[in-house]
């Protein structure tokens, strides 16, 4: 089996994605680039029934290298992102409800918290609607990508990405939290205090005292 340990990481990330309320049942997908190979979750399989044997290995052109399942129907979009964003190794697509709700009423999520600077890495744009299972999801993600590690897809969901699965998942989780906070603040009808560029830049400076290394 190709990349057995990495397959475990993909499956665990998919299950954590559901645990954190970013998807339900078989919604969304997870993918990981390893050199010229991409591991992707299969199409329309609930994550609690999935095993590492169900993870599909494809090349960067979408040819199946190993696996008995059909890969995610969003494969073309994922490969478009990976082929146009060489710094990205992991892509997570979700239908997380707070981000979708925000996409209905706003064109972007401004930087409203230190968490957005630390984990999401910036304000998040909302890309125009594209249908499911279409390369357009990837095209719009690349087109609208800014400093942040995710793009919200209007009326649909999000694409989160990063150097590895942990970074992409953290971006998705904290984007959802930030959207919830922003929507709660919007509901008050009062002016929302967003971080200034100077405040965001100050927060982004490494201080060397967070984490275990």
Image: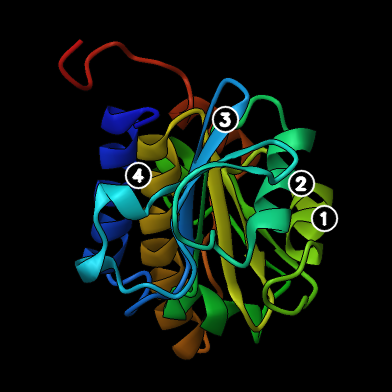
Alpha carbon of mark 3 to alpha carbon of mark 2: how far?
14 Å
User: Dot 1: what SS?
Assistant: helix
Q: Residue at x 70, y 36 (%)?
A: 60
The reply to whether residue 58 is in sight is yes
Please identify the quarter of the rendering in which residue 114 is found: top left
- Quadrant in which the C terminus appears: top left
Of the residues tagged 2 and 1, which is closer to the observer? 2
Q: Is residue 6 above or below residue 73?
A: above
Alpha carbon of mark 2 to alpha carbon of mark 4: how far?
19 Å
- Of the numbered discs 3 and 1, the one sitting upstream in the chain is 3
Whole-percent x and y of residue 122?
A: 58, 44
Alpha carbon of mark 4 to alpha carbon of mark 3: how far?
13 Å
User: Dot 3: what SS?
Assistant: strand
Q: Is residue 108 above or below residue 144?
A: below
Residue assigned mark 4:
10
Q: Answer left or right for 141 relative to 70.
A: right
Residue density around tag 4, few if under 14, some if 14–19, many if 20 or more, within 10 Å? many
Q: Are marks 1 and 4 in contact (CB under 8 Å)?
A: no
Residue assigned mark 3:
37
Q: Answer left or right for 104 relative to 204.
A: right
Of the residues tagged 4 and 3, which is closer to the observer? 3
Q: Are marks 3 and 2 in contact (CB under 8 Å)?
A: no
Given residues 54 and 177, the one toward you in this image is 54
Residue assigned mark 1:
139
The reply to whether residue 146 is in sight is no
Of the residues tagged 3 and 2, which is closer to the observer? 3
Q: What scheme was used to colour the molecule? A: rainbow
Given residues 197 and 50, the one toward you in this image is 50
């Amino acid at each position: 089996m190709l990349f057995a340990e990495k397959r475990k990481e993909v499956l665990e990330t998919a299950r954590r994605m559901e645990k954190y309320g970013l998807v339900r049942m078989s919604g969304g997908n997870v993918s990981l680039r390893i050199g010229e190979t991409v591991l992707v979750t299969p199409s329309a399989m609930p994550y609690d029934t999935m095993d590492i044997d169900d993870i599909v290995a494809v090349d960067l052109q979408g040819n199946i290298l190993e696996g008995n399942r059909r890969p995610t129907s969003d494969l073309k979009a994922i490969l478009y992102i990976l082929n146009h964003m060489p710094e990205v190794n992991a892509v997570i697509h979700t239908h997380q409800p707070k981000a979708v709700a925000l996409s209905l009423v706003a064109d972007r999520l401004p930087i409203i918290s230190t968490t957005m600077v630390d984990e999401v890495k910036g304000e998040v744009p909302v890309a125009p609607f594209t249908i499911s299972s279409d390369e357009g999801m990837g095209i719009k993600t690349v087109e609208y990508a800014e400093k942040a590690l995710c793009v919200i897809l209007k009326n649909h969901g999000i694409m989160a990405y990063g150097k590895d699965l942990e970074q992409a998942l953290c971006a998705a989780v904290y984007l959802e939290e930030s959207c919830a906070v922003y929507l709660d603040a919007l509901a008050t009808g009062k002016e929302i205090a967003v971080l200034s560029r100077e405040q965001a830049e100050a927060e982004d400076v490494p201080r060397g005292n967070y984490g275990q290394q």
